[in-house]
Amino acid sequence: MAFRHLACALGDDAVLGPGSDLSAYEDPYSFGMTEEFRASGAVLPRSVEEVQAVLAIANQHGVPLWTISLGRNLGYGGAAPRVSGSIVLDLRRLNRILEVNEEHAYALVEPGVSFFDLYEHIRERGLRLWISSPALGWGSVVGNALERGVGRTPYGDHAAQICGLEVVLANGDVVRTGMGALPCANTWQLFKGGYGPSLDGLFMQSNFGVVTKMGLWLMPQPQGLMSCLVRFQKESDLAAAVDALGPLRRQEVIQSNAQVGSILHQVVGRYPRARWYDGPGAIPDPVLEQIRQDLGLEWWSLRFALYGEENMLDARFEIVRRAFSMIRGAEILCQKHVASGADGLYAWELEGAAAHDAGVPSVSSLDVVKFRGEDGGHLDFSPIIAPTGREAVRAYRHVMARAREHGIDYVGSFTAGVRHLRHVFMIVYDKRDAEQKRGAADLFGILVKEMGQEGIGEYRAHLAFMDLIRGEYCFNDHAIRRFSETLKDALDPNGILSPGKQGIWPRTFRTERSP
Amino acid sequence: MAFRHLACALGDDAVLGPGSDLSAYEDPYSFGMTEEFRASGAVLPRSVEEVQAVLAIANQHGVPLWTISLGRNLGYGGAAPRVSGSIVLDLRRLNRILEVNEEHAYALVEPGVSFFDLYEHIRERGLRLWISSPALGWGSVVGNALERGVGRTPYGDHAAQICGLEVVLANGDVVRTGMGALPCANTWQLFKGGYGPSLDGLFMQSNFGVVTKMGLWLMPQPQGLMSCLVRFQKESDLAAAVDALGPLRRQEVIQSNAQVGSILHQVVGRYPRARWYDGPGAIPDPVLEQIRQDLGLEWWSLRFALYGEENMLDARFEIVRRAFSMIRGAEILCQKHVASGADGLYAWELEGAAAHDAGVPSVSSLDVVKFRGEDGGHLDFSPIIAPTGREAVRAYRHVMARAREHGIDYVGSFTAGVRHLRHVFMIVYDKRDAEQKRGAADLFGILVKEMGQEGIGEYRAHLAFMDLIRGEYCFNDHAIRRFSETLKDALDPNGILSPGKQGIWPRTFRTERSP
């Protein structure tokens, strides 16, 4: 019935009902729990009015929707819904770039706009703006920012660049946040505050509404860029590397997310594991050392870039160089790119690491899963850690030890924000190997629990672990969950919007919570 | 009855009931509507548990509370409640500095902590951290940040430095946001995101809960500081000044709030108006010119500072100098302060403008109201404007013209954030002069309405204008108000917490909304 109503309201071509090919809405990197996260169909509205129509029908039928922008949340479940039987509310057709303002350096986009789309739009017009793309550029700008994704430019904390949302609430009401609530205001994308409570954050990693427009600050293109690589020769250099980074990030000498990657982090996406090892368990240390020598890799590889006019680049570099020169054996390599004209450095003039550092989107990192063969998948464990060498080493040792026990390779990186480290441990597996997949899931669950007990929590999670992780955030007998669910019930009494997302369940579906 | 219960629960000394001196809870700069904003008493809890007890009693009696931190919201109503008869929930006794972390550069404070308190704490311990104080340092760090106050350092967008809150909800539940929901986490003040929706923003300019602890990022003290003043000689230079500032702020060459002040903005706080003019109406142009010549003032005065190591200061200054040298007649004056040792520049080693630029608190600006005599008051009109010369001039001309018509002097400034201007027009009046006060209120109401029609809205407001301004944010038939009040009713069904704040009314008090 719901599907028939949806087709009546939006047209047949906007609805994928039972019997349709729904493979696009399965988790591409499923690890054996696929049955639990299976959509019953999908609906693809073309406008805010059609989103409203979908919500009205979902309310009428009590059918849960699962909202996606482009559904590229890889490693976290892709486009699949938390509750089986949900209809995916697929926003890919809301794909307009409504405004790119060069003077004030912002964009207003719909959820169907990918990083490639936005980049091409800017490139075609020759605008002096840089975007900040995450590792994969085919995803949604809106979806990525709302899920707190990161990129490599100074605007790489994507959630922090959000300025003003348009949201359709479960009851169909359309809200504009911040200055967007003031008709005719030209400051919707300029001032985050607005008047009264700040509401943008409510819609991050959230099921409180359907975001249909998002303002995003873009980077005015700088005059210059210096791509930097610091090579560390010893496993034990992790502590020194992170300790050197801390003050440089806090003082914003380094203005962007700096990433420290392990040996295998440098190998995945370039070579298959089988080239060196095909035995049981994780790659043993001697083999790891062999890989390192074969490829001339460092133990830890630190990548970041500096931005600004040439005199600023030189000043920043001098401070950075001094900091890393204190670490024995550390080698710093830099490449400077300075604009020839006064317009600044166009991103499309750059290549390789520099293009990456300028936020140019690519899909090169898609190949990371081929580390475990053509049918590889990955699951990302993403805890937030205090930015000190001691804490990084503590997390690294813990993860490494448990990974070994489960026969899983350590492919890890630490991304340094201004005051935190985001440790991403990528569990890569062969999707055809049931044992590997079970091992991945087991390891993940153990890490969440053990590290949670030490006060380390994840910032994002695969569908299968949303409840588990939510459960770790249990101060005052789960006060944050109680609070969030009070809001949820007030805003979405029928519980139609993405029930279970990040462990927030509406009253109507609360029994579905994982024990 | 409520007072008796409060005294039973908290002790007599924690309650000011009927008959007590409640002058501390009156608007010190009241402009003739005092009767409407009169507290019936106050309660001063000492702990979170006592806050919970107060809320329980208020719920039981259906008595509205009006939460203040230190109540120094001058120009916006001070400590006075929106609804007469409210009991002021005065949090001054929650005044612990729970942590100041030098390594990670943050503080965790309670609402009763003033900028002076925090500064002295840091100074006594010799910590290498700077705070960012607003114009008046006696106010609450928590209250100011939640109300979106600003200071002059690179951390001067105080709301943007908030990282993690503890909030007591109307039902007494205690919630910790972000990583604070994870027991034992050492990242509560390090990562703003947490897991799931970001909730900190909900409690800004809000009546959704009582904030009892707040994390705030502090600035690692830099090696150097350059205090800069740019003097503009012509009234028409405003456009060029703002246009030059825009790119410098967006590119973060200038890292902090830069303030452009009018002639009288430079005079208030230093001299009484009567020294030059005591006639009817606003100070006429020839007198304004006389003042300018007498004091050797510029038409517009731009103040900001640069921060960092000496090579960074020099690089920044070179770019800034180049930008302003394009403006005819503009004169740039700078004073550089560089630390003698590797510890960086201690704020307490600085004086005058440099101390201000280093966030050192003071109360020197208290005297601004003496511009209209010993019994002066002020009311601040604070619209948000796009950061272009054209928009600044449009706002300036509009405000100036209407101010003249009402016989009110233009005391104005434009503070340049990264992508917006905050225009603060300070209406200074003699509190003993009923006509001046009426004129101030009339002018304010006219400006809100007229500028609102042009898409310009205020970020903050005096009690008397909260509903008026809320009404201007009316997109989709007041969707933002409807949304906010849905949350309000869910979180505070009895409507006990600060009803009417920023125009958000609980169901139980909705009839009190100004027409």
Image: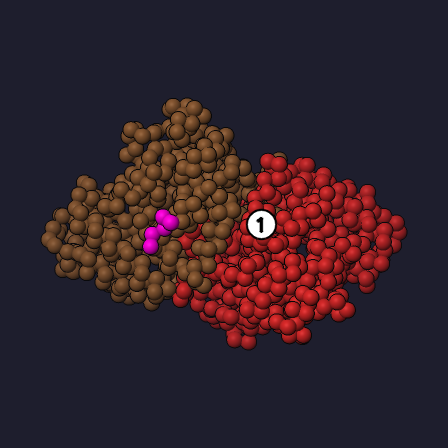
Chain colours: A red, B brown
As drawn, B441 above or below A114: above
Residue B329 or residue A332, whichever sits in front = B329
Residue A57 or residue B151, whichever sits in front = A57
Q: Mark 1 lies on which chain?
A: A
Question: Residue sitting at 28 percent across and 61 percent down?
Answer: B396
As drawn, B362 above or below A195: above
Counting from the top left corner in percent of width and height, residue A116 is at 61, 69
Position of the C terminus of chain B by quadrant: bottom left
* Chief secondary structure of the magenta portion: loop
Classify 10 Å Cα crowding around label 1: few (below 14), some (14-19), many (20 and above).
some
Counting from the top left corner in percent of width and height, residue B86 is at 36, 38
Question: Residue sitting at 33 percent across and 47 percent down?
Answer: B463
Question: Magenta region: which residues?
Answer: B511-515
Tag 1 secondary structure: helix
Q: Can residue B61 be seen in this view?
A: yes
Counting from the top left corner in percent of width and height, residue A490 is at 55, 50
Splitting the image into 4 quarters, where does residue A326 fall?
top right
Question: Residue sitting at 28 percent across and 66 percent down?
Answer: B328
How many numbered discs? 1
Reply yes or no: does residue B513 show up in magenta. yes
Which residue is under mark 1? A489
Position of the N terminus of chain B by quadrant: top left
Question: Residue sitting at 82 percent across and 50 percent down?
Answer: A438
Q: In this view, does B329 lie to the left or right of A213?
A: left
Reply yes or no: does residue A56 show up in magenta. no
Q: In this view, does B467 lie to the left or right of B122?
A: left
Counting from the top left corner in percent of width and height, residue B509 is at 40, 46
**Label 1 sits on what residue type?**
Asp
Q: Can residue A71 be seen in this view?
A: no
Of all residues, the one furthest to the right in this rendering is A279
Residue A410 or residue A32, whichever sits in front = A32
Of all residues, the one furthest to the left in this rendering is B279
